[in-house]
Image: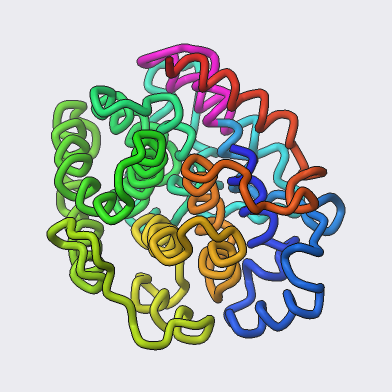
Amino acid sequence: MLLSGVGDALGYRNQLWEFNDSGPAIHQELQELGGLKKISVKLPDWPVSDDTVLHLATAEALATGKAGEELLHEVAFRYVEGMKDMDGRMPGRSTIIGVNQLRPGHEGGYRVLYNPGARGCGAAMRSMCIGLRYPRPDQLSSLVEVAVETGRMTHPHPTGFLGGVASALFASYAVQRRPITTWGLGLLEEACPVAKTFVKSVGYAVTETEKDWDYFTEKWKWYLDLRGLSLGTEAVTWPDRYGPAERDKAYESFSLSGWGGGCGHDSPMIALDALLGAGSDWEELMSRAGFHGGDSDSTAAIACCCWGLLYEMDGVPKCNYRNLEYRGRLESVAEKLYALSH
């Protein structure tokens, strides 16, 4: 939870880096700041963005121990409250539209109208904690159901809410110590079919959802082919050169509209790409997941959460997290989720 917030704050850089479309330019500015080891992540220069505020909202709702509809109303309530804390944090359009429709406490008040444009990364960036609440393989259906329903509160389009399923799933895989090379295949072969069956069983916006379903799964199949992971084998296929400029081009090819990490399918995709390439190296992870042209804070929030589960705080400079905004809330809710998951 803590490193997810760190990744968000670093990738965001108070709007300067999230909206910078050049990875090489960001790396140049990073060098001018003295590199990652010299950055003290604290207010006012390094606030967390909407990503962490809404990840906390999801996590703190889960930490109440509620389940079923009661949990969904709790999440909806906390999203509404979270939107009061958005000054300077740049929430996305679909998130604003969705939360404005939520009516927590009223029957069906956690449902919103189907929005064919809600394909962004808003669900993906706030769902890792669902994997912390339901980390075991036998909890897959609970993980998927909660990720789908909370994701659809703002992103009812499958490209949007399946991003939430991916982030939650990858966090659970990290807890399970499942080989990273198998995560994408698990998403396609295990989680997505469960999500599709669940959508049908609930009976909300089934026709629209099924019509728009295939983009997410087809793009993930394409990515796994690109990296040689379609069979779950160990060796990852990388380009000969894969520096900041090459990554910008690659992430653009992952994306829907040229903004790498901006959608539900490609924000966890870039996070996974970074985890596969960085190993246990924190600076390399941030270089790949947080300092690129595109939605750099969301991709970093996802990647850093999973990295923290795999490698803890090893190699992370204290200045990167010691004074992080909302550090106390992040650590407190993490302890509650850990207790509930055991």
What is the x, y in percent for residue 41? 78, 53
What is the x, y in percent for residue 244? 53, 81
Quadrant of the drawing holding the N terminus: top right
What is the x, y in percent for residue 187? 24, 47
Q: Residue at x 33, y 52 (%)?
A: 180
Q: Where 54 falls versus 334 (above or below)?
A: below
Asked whether residue 262 is in view, the answer is no
Q: How is the image coloured?
A: rainbow
Q: Residue at x 83, y 59 (%)?
A: 45
Q: Residue at x 54, y 62 (%)?
A: 285
Q: Where 97 falls versus 12 (above or below)?
A: above
Lateral position of residue 42 relative to residue 316, left or right: right
Decide which of 253, 132 is in the foreground and name it. 132
Quadrant of the drawing holding the C terminus: top left
- Predominant secondary structure in magenta? helix
Q: Which residues are magenta?
A: 58-79
Q: How many marks?
A: 0
What is the x, y in percent for residue 110? 43, 27
Lateral position of residue 3 relative to residue 133, left or right: right
Q: Residue furthest right?
A: 44
Decide which of 53, 299 is in the foreground and name it. 299
Q: Residue at x 38, y 16 (%)?
A: 69
Lateral position of residue 276 relative to residue 103, left or right: left
Asked whether residue 149 is in view, the answer is yes
**Image quadrant assignment for residue 142:** top left
Decide which of 179, 254 is in the foreground and name it. 179
Lateral position of residue 31 relative to residue 51, left or right: right
